[in-house]
Amino acid sequence: MAASILKVVGIAKSFGGVQALKGVSLEIDAGEIHCLAGENGSGKSTLIKVISGVHEPDAGSIEIVGRRLSRLSPMEAIALGIQVIYQDFSVFPNLSVMENLALNMELMDKRALMNWGRARAIAAHAVSLIGFEVDLDERVENLSVADRQLVAICRALLHDSKLIIMDEPTSALTKKEVKALFAVIKSLQSRGISILFVSHKLDEVFEISERFTILRNGENVAAGSTEELDHRTFAFHMTGREFAEASYKSDRAPGPPVLSVKGLSQVGSYEGISFDLAQGEILGITGLLGSGRTELVETLFGISSPDSGSIEIAGREVRMRSVKDAIALGIGYVPSDRLTEGLFLPQSIERNAVIGVLGRLCNSLGLLNRRAVAELMSKWIAELSIAAKDPSLPVKTLSGGNQQKVVLARWLASELSVLILNGPTMGVDIGAKYDIHALMRELASKGLAIIIVSDDLPEVLACASRILVMRDGAFIQELEPATTTESRLGELSTGVA
């Protein structure tokens, strides 16, 4: 039996009377890939911060490589081989790869001046540890999300890591990038390094980890081997809810198209795109990053213009020169990156939800009717089950799933005929994911025409009434979800059988 690299027992932690952890225990063996799962607010982040010395536990003990500790500082955790890679990777975007990799080593050695030759040698050694090919002089802000993550991993390895904690490491990665990350994780494991993989994505948990621990409401609810679990049981442990498998098929008789696209082309992005979208239909568009899927729907929302082809709304050809034109035509768009493109993070939940209909909420003097705003917000909090204790709080205080519901509320408050969702459940936990799927089906059943763009193949199969596969800027096949499998969708998307 492998020796434990980490053992925490009975950890409790409270913040201002709110108990975040209630006697949580976790054990990780040397060279093990262990998944820590749970919905947002389950206590995962608090536990990570206790293990890494950021928070001091109110009760319980921590044992690292056989050394029992009642308290731990961040520097002590690093010295004992504990490294955490947070969702933002904690890199300096304005510095080069070399500076990001070497800076901590220089600071730990208490050097007053940076020795650039030594810094380059440190950085070159760091990237060689995982075979990462990157320009050491490139600014980190110019790298892809996946490459920034690899920079963070390389930096962690410079400190003789024994346990690397990865907090939601795949939340912003494509399928291809996830596969590459998993190969790196496996290579770390082969060298005896343990990985604590924090996630709520069930497919990834089953693919990469050997054992799991699930938290709910700050407590242990399940632990064991991933081989002993199925998706339904895992989802129940995480949420305390039973989810029935569902699919969508419109009950409406086929009617005239709400949206028609004919021969739409944009040089370098997509070419010859044609399709119709009817009332009550959920059209799924799937394909790899770079297939042209996002560029296409951004054109439909007026963010960019096509070079040729036409767009018709309710049988009438339209020209969308701006987002304002698209909104006036009854088209709404939920972007894939809600944090930078979909929300005003410092602003209140309430303001984010009603920003699209401010004109309707003003009195004859042009002043905002506070009562009308509060009533509209209450309506959408109730209808979308938005977990917002106080709508006046900044929207950034909400979980990912509730933030996504606020973006949806903004569009649903408008008079829409077409709603486009790009990555509708990206970065949300499983409970919110099922809620959003159910909401899409309900909206479609009431007549809203919906387009979902996603490379989450189970999501596309569960929600779409029809699927279009996009590759190299073109639609290559139309499929019926009921007769299609994930593997078939994957083969068509990649072109690899």
Image (cartoon, rainbow, N blue to C red):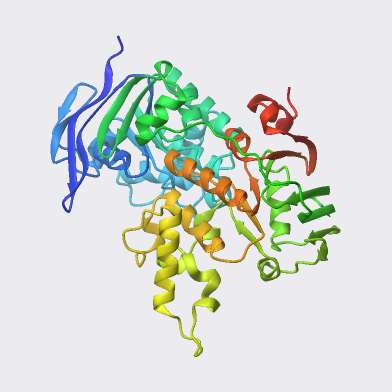
Compared across the picture, whether 114 is left or right of 57 comes to right
Residue for point 71% across, 38% down:
467
Compared across the picture, whether 9 is left or right of 442 comes to left
Observer-nearest residue: 163 or 218? 218
Q: Is residue 201 above or below residue 420?
A: above
Residue for point 41% across, 31% down:
235
Observer-nearest residue: 413 or 11? 413
Q: Quadrant of the C terminus?
A: top right
Observer-nearest residue: 86 or 265? 265
Q: Is residue 3 above or below residue 203?
A: above
- Check the image and name the residue furthest to the bottom: 365
Q: Position of residue 415 (x, y in %)?
A: 61, 66
Q: Position of residue 127 (x, y in %)?
A: 51, 34
Q: Is residue 197 above or below residue 301?
A: above
Can the viewer see residue 317 in this picture?
yes
Q: Position of residue 298 (x, y in %)?
A: 69, 57
Compared across the picture, whether 45 is left or right of 56 comes to right
Q: Quadrant of the N terminus?
A: top left
- Check the image and name the residue furthest to the top: 1
Q: Is residue 454 above or below residue 334?
A: above
